[in-house]
Image (cartoon, grey):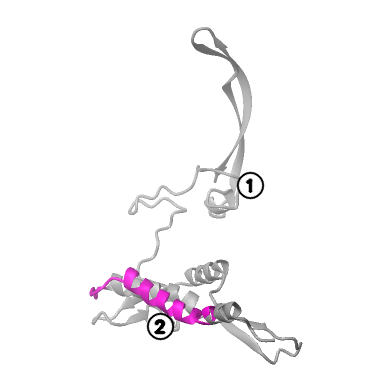
């Protein structure tokens, strides 16, 4: 039993996935990369942009499908698929955590690792020239106030969660008694009148 025309067309289309990927790679390069500039910032941007593109292109996944009546898979069609978005983002996050501090040579052509003991960055490594400010502690130069005394969410795993926002310093739990409007009623015409009720609210603040 052979493939009908629709199935054959479907396999052929998916088999050209690598062509579409290269087109996307080239288009993203034209769209994102700074053109003409040879300063350090442009060189770093071009390198990191390429690393992002390679995180997709170099990790394409080969998929195959057997067809026909035999179970031996003597005849099959294979194609390349884009990696899952989650795997791409996880890979980029790993490179971000291990980003290499570099400087650019006098000609503005080469990226060199600042530490001589660090291996030269590969095309897939992320690089930077200026260390990010320490947002955990107050820093007058950058205007950062730090996170001490900031309120946080004890149950959140996100950026507003206590574990992350407090930078590992821990946090304090405080119970606040406050007055809030309650038992509000509409009075003709036209006013809403409320009672004042006592309410306890738990607040978590970074140490």
Q: Which mark is residue 32?
A: none
Residue that mark 2 sits on: 116
Asked if residue 9 is positioned above or below residue 139 in the image, the reply reads below
Q: Is residue 191 something that shows in the picture?
A: yes
Helix, strand, or loop for circle 1? loop
Farthest top residue in view: 188
Q: Is residue 37 left or right of residue 119?
A: left
Helix, strand, or loop for circle 2? loop
Residue at x 58% of width, y 80% of height = 5
Q: Is residue 130 left or right of residue 53?
A: left
Q: Is residue 61 something that shows in the picture?
A: no
Residue that mark 1 sits on: 155
Q: Quadrant of residue 203?
A: top right
Residue at x 36% of width, y 73% of height = 27
Question: What is the crowding at mark 2: few (fewer than 14 residues within 10 Å), some, or many (at least 20)?
Answer: few
Residue at x 57% of width, y 21% of height = 179
Label the magenta part by its dominant secondary structure.
helix
């Amino acid at each position: 039993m052979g493939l009908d025309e629709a199935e054959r067309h479907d396999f052929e289309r998916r088999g050209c996935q690598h062509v579409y990927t290269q087109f996307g790679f080239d288009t993203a390069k034209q769209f994102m990369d700074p053109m003409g500039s040879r300063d350090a910032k442009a060189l770093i941007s071009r390198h990191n942009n390429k690393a992002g593109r390679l995180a997709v292109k170099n990790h394409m996944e080969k998929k195959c499908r057997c067809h026909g009546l035999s179970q031996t898979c003597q005849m099959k069609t294979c194609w390349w698929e884009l990696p899952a978005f989650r795997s791409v983002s996880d890979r980029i996050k790993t490179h971000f955590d291990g980003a290499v501090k570099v400087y650019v040579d006098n000609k503005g052509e080469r990226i060199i690792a600042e530490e001589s003991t660090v291996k030269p960055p590969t095309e897939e490594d992320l690089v930077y020239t200026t260390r990010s400010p320490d947002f955990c502690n107050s820093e007058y130069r950058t205007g950062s106030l730090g996170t001490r005394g900031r309120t946080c969410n004890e149950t959140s795993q996100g950026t507003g969660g206590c574990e992350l926002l407090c930078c590992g310093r821990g946090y304090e739990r405080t119970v606040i008694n406050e007055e809030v409007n309650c038992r509000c009623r509409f009075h003709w015409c036209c006013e809403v009148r409320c009672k004042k009720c006592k309410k306890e609210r738990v607040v978590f603040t970074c140490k």
